[in-house]
Amino acid sequence: MKLVKRKFPKTRLRRTRMKSFSRKMVSENNLTANDVIWPVFLTEENKSKTEIKALPSVYRYPIELLLKDLEQPIAQGLNAVALFPHITDDKKDEEGSYAFSPNNLIFKAVKRIKQEYPNIGVICDVALDPYTTHAHDGIIRNNEVDNDKSLEKLVEQALLLADAGADILAPSDMMDGRVGRIRTSLEKKEYHNTMIMSYAAKYASSLYGPFREAVNAGILVKPKNKKSYQMDISNIHEAMHEISMDINEGADMIMIKPGLPYLDVISRAKELFSIPTFAYQVSGEYSMIMSAVYNNHIKESDIIIETMLCFKRAGANGIFTYFAPKILNLLSKNN
Ligand code: PBG
């Protein structure tokens, strides 16, 4: 970038900031309904929707009630949802068998959403953690999450999700080689157009805590954290390495996670790879914001829009956010 040498008072940057119309004329980023993806939690447990304690205004939905609550956001322009299951303990085991059970909660939900709203994009997580008793994303062997054994299971899960009609598979498990194996298996089954959005740079973050409550992922026992597969928080070069591998293996889009504290990773990835890049404003970020809002330290609508514009400025093509319904309300009010 060339530095402009013009000086005050020939240049007063406040001139364009002075009025609303000129601020709008020079604004570099905009937020639209197309930018938000709504992650939703599904349950078979209750007949009504239940609020998640750590995530105020975020609910676990029985399928039919989610369909009802999708109506307004879709009318306001919601383009895609990401589905996460809340599974009760009695359905969990070491291998996450319920993830492969025909007609399970997620398969049913994908089909119903597609029936009711054929144009909405449905994104499904590929990972076993909501289904396993140990709450890890893969299969445990010798007290370790076994990469290659997990791959077999994750590929099987991915194909079943594609069978159910998922538009985008989002492997969030961070096993090596998963994107390539899933892509090859999809091609073999002639799912040429099923997209893969890889959680390419997913960090071993403390910000997923409330999500684990939301999906009833118990306490991680052996191993007691996900550091052997999720990325070290201090690394960015490794993130670029991961992303380049996932792209070479067949990812159509990539995801960086968590969100706001990781904007450097988004912007570097976008610059280096020019591939559709998504951000996930994760559960811990949502909880922190809501705590400040409830204490009247920050105004909710302002902080939500500010965070979204920060993601856009960093280069995100879209943002997974639990604020999606609120954002769509705000956007439709402003129009
Ligand atoms: C599952 C998964 C997690 C999240 C999305 N998919 C949790 C984890 O990896 O422990 C976190 C999302 C959030 O915190 O909002 N692999």
Image (cartoon, grey):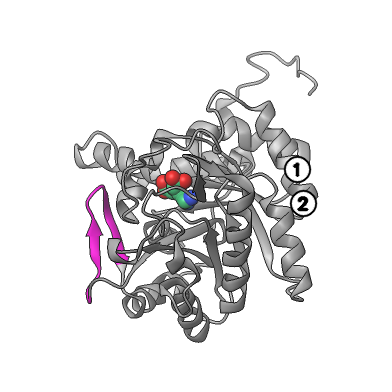
Q: Which mark is residue 245?
A: 1
Would residue 69 be visible to someone looking at this image? Answer: yes
- Percent from the top left, x then y, of residue 134? 38, 48
Q: Residue at x 46, y 70 (%)?
A: 76
Give yes or no for residue 234 being in the magenta stretch.
Answer: no
Q: Is mark 2 within 8 Å of ligand 1?
A: no
Q: Is residue 264 left or right of residue 64?
A: right
Q: Main secondary structure of the magenta part?
A: strand
Vertical comparison of 45 with 227: above or below: below
> Which residue occupies the foreground of this view, 321 or 30?
321
Label 1 crowd bin: few (<14), some (14–19), many (20+), radius 10 Å? some
SS at mark 1 in the image: helix
- Percent from the top left, x then y, of residue 204? 49, 35
Residue type at mark 2: give it.
Glu
> Which residue occupies the foreground of this view, 105 or 283?
105
> Which residue occupies the foreground of this view, 202 or 330?
202
Q: Is mark 1 within 8 Å of ligand 1?
A: no
Residue type at mark 1: give it.
Met
Label 2 belongs to which residue? 249
Q: Residue at x 25, y 69 (%)?
A: 49
Name the quadrant containing residue 244: top right
